Image (spheres, rainbow, N blue to C red):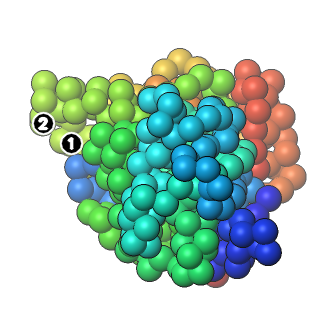
Amino acid sequence: MHNSSQTDPPPTAAGTAQGFAHAKAILFGEHAVVYGSPAVAVPLHGLGVQADIRRSPAQETRIESQLFSGTAQTAPEPMGPVVAGLRAALSAVDDPDAEVELLIRSAIPHSRGLGSSAAVATAVARAVANLEATVFAEETLHEIVQAAEAVAHGRPSGIDAWAVAKPAPIRFQTGCAETIDVGERLVFVLADSGHHGSTAEAVGGVRARRDADPSRIGATISRLAELTDAAVDDIRSGDRVTIGSRMLEAHGLLGGLGVSNPTLDALVDAATAAGAHGAKLTGGGLGGCVLALADDDEAAEELAEALRAAGAPRTWTTEVRPT
Ligand code: MEV
């Protein structure tokens, strides 16, 4: 699996160019971030997507992916973000009407809160830039990916678009992303609940709850913001125990926003019973994944086993390296 970087390899002799991006997990602040609060995301380097692109010999654009293979014109609705991202990227290189052949190979499960749509758009945009022997500036890449994300999720905060493009953990707030220094290595286990979660539906549900009860939901969002900023300090100092306890509190608060469910709660309970410092749902919720913080690699193995025994169809272990 490739790690994403700002500099993708040059086009091959056959005229095919590639782009890569990785998945992300939100460690703190999902949903609250939609209302201007900070959030923290970590890169998942072991889970990635590769896009291969070349100019089409025919007068049409073709896309090949796990979800759909055929012409861009006949692509079904779920492919809308890919087509939007591709067109935005081609416009950004002043070639909006170019016809291309695009092959997308992704190991990132979709609708699991792992930033699959943003990662695909990022890989596609990097491949387009690479085809033109250029590299998009960070802001340009971000705008392209946000165009795709708007089709995927409505009005995304923008954290996913940054998180899948940055190689290190970030603190994101109101459009700005900054890299966080990491004091100690952190080992996380990610457990798939086995159920899709729609980010758009989850965000819509929180909005409806906030409209109905602004003071309660406002207080929850404020507390999530406090936890996020306190956790940034813990990440810097490498305090796993405190990060873990804040994760558990955040999971409870997200439950109060209506985005958890019994399957996610059971995985969080299983993680704590198996010795995790903490665990919480990650991303939009209503399905998707639980992220658990292990003490070390050995503990992570036991944790992953316990999470699978508790019903997770698959788990991934990922590390955040000290800087
Ligand atoms: C999705 O990864 C994170 C949410 O906060 C939505 C967003 O930020 O746009 C749920």
Residue 93 percent location from the top left of the image = 44, 72
CB atoms at circles 1 and 2 under 8 Å apart? yes
Residue corresponding to mark 2: 215
The number of numbered badges drawn on the structure is: 2
Residue 114 percent location from the top left of the image = 57, 45
Which of these two is toward me, 265 or 104? 104
- Residue that extends furthest to the top in the rendered view of this protein: 262
Residue corresponding to mark 1: 219
Q: Is residue 281 visible?
A: no
Q: How many C-alpha atoms fall within 10 Å of the one at disc 2: few (<14), some, or many (≥20)?
A: few
The residue carrying mark 1 has its beta carbon less than 8 Å from ligand 1:
no
Q: Secondary structure at mark 2?
A: helix
Q: Residue at x 50, y 46 (%)?
A: 82
Q: Secondary structure at mark 1?
A: helix
The residue carrying mark 2 has its beta carbon less than 8 Å from ligand 1:
no
Q: Residue at x 53, y 18 (%)?
A: 262
Q: Amino acid at mark 1?
A: Ala
Which of these two is toward me, 277 or 314? 314
Residue 8 percent location from the top left of the image = 66, 75
Q: Amino acid at mark 2?
A: Ser
Q: CA distance from mark 1 to mark 2?
A: 6 Å
